[in-house]
Image: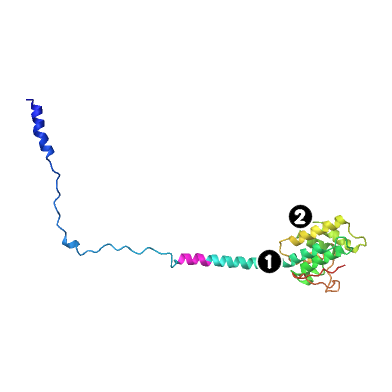
Amino acid sequence: MDPATVNSEIVTPVIANAQPAVPMATAPNPALADLQDIIHPDPIGAWPWAIGYWLVLALVIALITLLVIWLRKRARDFAPKKAAKQLLNQLDKQAPSYVSDVNSLLKRTAMSYLSRDAIASLDGEAWATWLDSYLPAPKRQRIGHLLAKRHQPTPLTLAEANELHELAKAWLASKAKLSAPEPNLVQAKGYVQASGNAQAKSQAPIQPADPQQPEAQC
């Protein structure tokens, strides 16, 4: 018999009859019997808020409040100009008194922001220079020439009336804060400031709810 065959017959039954090893039972540890299960903490909720959230909320509320106050103040500041725009659109451009009406409207609007003494006595080139300071650069040096024609018997042409309307509308649309003219401006180029109200006609500041047309000013 072949020795290889004999060895295979002897080894094979040993491998076939092999049993898996059984682990030895471990005795329970008496020290672990008294231990309790692990207790997990409750999940963190969204309430109450941390101090940082309250600070952010307070800051947002403060900013919103300031914005509302600023918008309301801005609306009050521009209310006279807004009312004057409506009155300007109601004026008849072909009326002989159109130039005087526009001039009176501009003065009444200016006196809604500044004192009567600072505005009522302005006339001529000093008045035109002060108006020009609140007009865009391309529109300057024209309103004084047109307003001066209120002293002439010949009324404005339709083109001149349209130009004066656009200039007045641009002045009313200016967002710049009005300031009183300097004394040297009032006396510039031979125009002396009138003392008191002797040379100023009765005028009233523009009110937002004023439904009446402005009176002509000479």
Q: Which residue is mark 1?
A: 75
Residue located 80% across and 58% down the image? 167
- Residue 184: tell me if it is visible: no
The alpha-carbon separation of the residues under discs 1 and 2 comes to 26 Å
- Quarter of the image with the N terminus in it: top left
Q: Please state if 29 lies on the left or on the right of 138 as rendered.
A: left
Residue located 51% across and 66% down the image? 57
Q: Residues within 10 Å of mark 2 (few under 14, many from 20)?
A: few
Residue 197 screen position, x and y as percent: 83, 74
| Residue type beneath disc 1 | Ala
User: Does residue 181 show up magenta in the picture?
Assistant: no
- Residues at circles 1 and 2 in contact by the CB criterion of under 8 Å: no
- Residue 11: tell me if it is visible: yes
Mark 1 or 2, nearer chain start:
1
* Viewer-nearest residue: 3 or 81: 3
Residue located 47% across and 65% down the image? 53
Q: Secondary structure at mark 2?
A: helix
Numbered badge on residue 137: 2
Q: In the rendered structure, which segment of residues is drawn in magenta?
A: 51-58
Location of residue 208 by image quarter: bottom right
Residue 89 screen position, x and y as percent: 80, 62
Location of residue 178 by image quarter: bottom right
| Residue that protrudes farthest toward the left in the picture | 1
Residue 3 screen position, x and y as percent: 8, 27
Can you tell which of label 1 and label 2 is closer to the viewer? 1
Dominant SS of magenta comes to helix
